[in-house]
Image (cartoon, grey):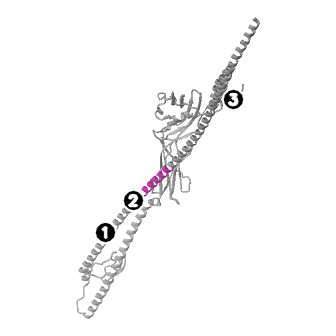
Amino acid sequence: MIYPLWACSPLNSHIKLQNWLLQMAVLPPLRTVSVLVVHLLLTSFCRGQFKLIGPTQPVVARVSDDIILPCHLEPAVDVGAKTLEWTRPDLKPRFVFVWRAGQDHVNVKNPSYEGRTSLLIGELKHGNISLKLSKVKTSDEGRYKCYIPEMKIDSTVELVVVAVSSPVISLSGIDQNSGRVVLQCNSTGWYPEPEVFWLDGEGNLLSAGPTETVRGPDDLYTVSSRVTVEKRHSNSFTCRVQQNHINQIRETQIHVPDSFFDQSNFFTILGLAVVLAFILALSILLSLLCVRRRKKNKTENSHSDETDQGQNNHSRGAKGEEQISAEERQTMMQESVQMQDPPVQSTSVSSAPVQSSCFSIKWPLVTRQRFKEEKQKLKEEQQELKEEQQKLKAEQQKLKAEQQRREKAENKIQIMEKELQKSKKEKQKLKKEQQTLKEELQKLKDEQQKLEKEQQKLKKEQQKSEKEQQKSEKEQQKSEKEQQKSEKEQQNFKEELKEKTREFQAEKEKDVVAEKE
C-alpha cells in the first residue's frame, strides 16, 4: 500500500492526513486498522520535524530597556496548553519563566527576574514563545534557553547588555609657568568598561594621563581622564569614549579661547606696564623741575650781574666811601647760603662756578632775606613733589581699580563661556536624544512593517487553510455521498440476494412438490 508523501509536510499536514483517512474509511475493516496504525506511526515520526528557532546573532539591549528574546516553533502549532520553560544554566534556581497549564508559575522563578518576565500570550497559538524581559540589568547578560519538555526540543538565545553615555569636558586648571591648559573628561554609566582617547582639531591622538575607572554599585563604570594642552591652530580638542566589543562611540568637543593660554603672562606684563608708567612719570617730573631751576638760575644770574655792575659803578663814583673789610665779607659769607645740590667747592669772596645734576650756574652771595626766599621756594617745590607723588599714588590706585575691573570682566567672560559651553552641550544632548528618538521611531516603524507582513502572511496561511478545509469538507461530503451510495448499493444487493434466495427457495419447494407428486 502506498502512503502519501505529504503526511509529514510542515504545512497543514494534519488536515490532509485526516482527509486521506476519511477517504480510506470506505475500505474493508482490515485496511482501516492498518491505516490507523500507520497514522499513529506517522504522528510519532512527525514529532521529530518540529523545531524551535532562535536568533543566530546575540540580542543587544541597553540598561533599563525592555527587550524581547525571540523563539518560535516551526511548523507553527498552538502551544498555549503545553509546558514552556525559559532557563539560564548559570543561575540557581535556573528558571527565568515557567508556563504550565496556561499559567505563570512564579514560585519556581529566580528572584532576580520576579515581575520582569512574561510571554506574548496572544502569540502562543501561532507557536511564538518569545520572552519579554523588562528593565534590563547588567546582571541579565548571559545565555538563555527556551524549552518545550513534551517535544524535547530547545533553542538558545544570547543576551548582551550595554550602557553608554556622552562625556563631559571641563577646565581643570592653568599652568602659569608653561602657559598650558589642563582639561578633564568625565563619563558615567558605561557597560562594559570603555576606553578614553584625546584628539586635537586635526584628529591626532594626544598623550594623556592614565584613565581613572570606578565601578559603581549598579555595575556601571565611570571613567575620567586628564590632558595638558598647549596653544594650537584651532584650539579645539575632543574627548572620545568607546567600547570596541559593542561598537559604541561617544565623543564631545571643546574649543579653548586664546585668552586662557595668554592668561599666565598677563600679570607679569601688567606689572611691567605699571613700573614703566611710574618711571616715565618720574622722568617727566624731574625734567620739569630741571627746566624750572634753569629758568630761575638764569633770572638770578642776570640779577647778580646787574648788582655787580652797580657796585662797580658805585665804587668808581664814590671813592670816599668806606670799603667793606675782609672780616665783614667773611661774616657775610658765613651768613650767605649757596643754593646748589652738590657741595660747594670753594668759599672765596668771588663767585665760583658750581656743577649741578641738571645745570651749572654761579651762585652769588645772598643775604638772610634771600636765604629765606630760597628756603620758601624749596618748601614749595617739596610740596609740589608731594602733590605729584599723591597724583602718582592716585594713578596707581586707578590702575589697580582698572586691573580689578578687568579681572572681574574676565571672570564674567569665563562664566559666560562656561554657560555657552553648557548650552552647547545641552543642545548636543538634545540633538543626540532627538536622533536616538528618531532611530527608535524608525525601529518601531520597521517592526510594525515586519508585524504587518507577518500578519499578512498569517492571513494568507489562514485563507489557504480555510480553502483547504473547504476542499476537505467538500471531499468529505463527496465521500459521505459515495458511502451513502455504497450503502444503498449494499442494501439493494442484499434485497436482491434476499429476493433471489426467496425465489430459489420457492423453486426448490416447487421441485420438491413435483418430485413428491
Label 2 sits on residue? 412
Question: Label 1 to label 3, Cα distance in Å?
Answer: 122 Å
Amino acid type of the residue tagged 3 in the rendering: Pro
Residue 72 part of the magenta-drawn span: no
The answer to whether residue 350 is visible is no
Residue, far bottom: 317
Residue, far right: 515
Camera-near label (2 vs 1) is: 2
The answer to whether residue 154 is visible is yes
Query: Looking at the picture, does residue 361 appear above or below residue 470?
Result: below
| Contact (Cβ within 8 Å) of mark 2 with mark 1 | no
Q: Which mark is residue 486?
A: none
Which quadrant of the view contains residue 494? top right
Amino acid type of the residue tagged 1 in the rendering: Gln
The magenta span reads 414-435
Label 3 sits on residue? 4
Most frequent secondary structure within the magenta stretch: helix
Residue in the foreground of this view, choosing between 280 and 118: 118
Q: Earlier in the sequence, mark 2 or mark 1?
A: 1
Q: Earlier in the sequence, mark 1 or mark 3?
A: 3
Q: Position of residue 65 (x, y in %)?
A: 49, 41
Tell whether 488 sits left or right of 402: right
Q: Which element type, helix, strand or loop, lies under badge 2?
A: helix
Question: Label 2 to label 1, Cα distance in Å?
Answer: 32 Å
Label 1 sits on residue? 390
Tell whether 89 sits left or right of 325: right
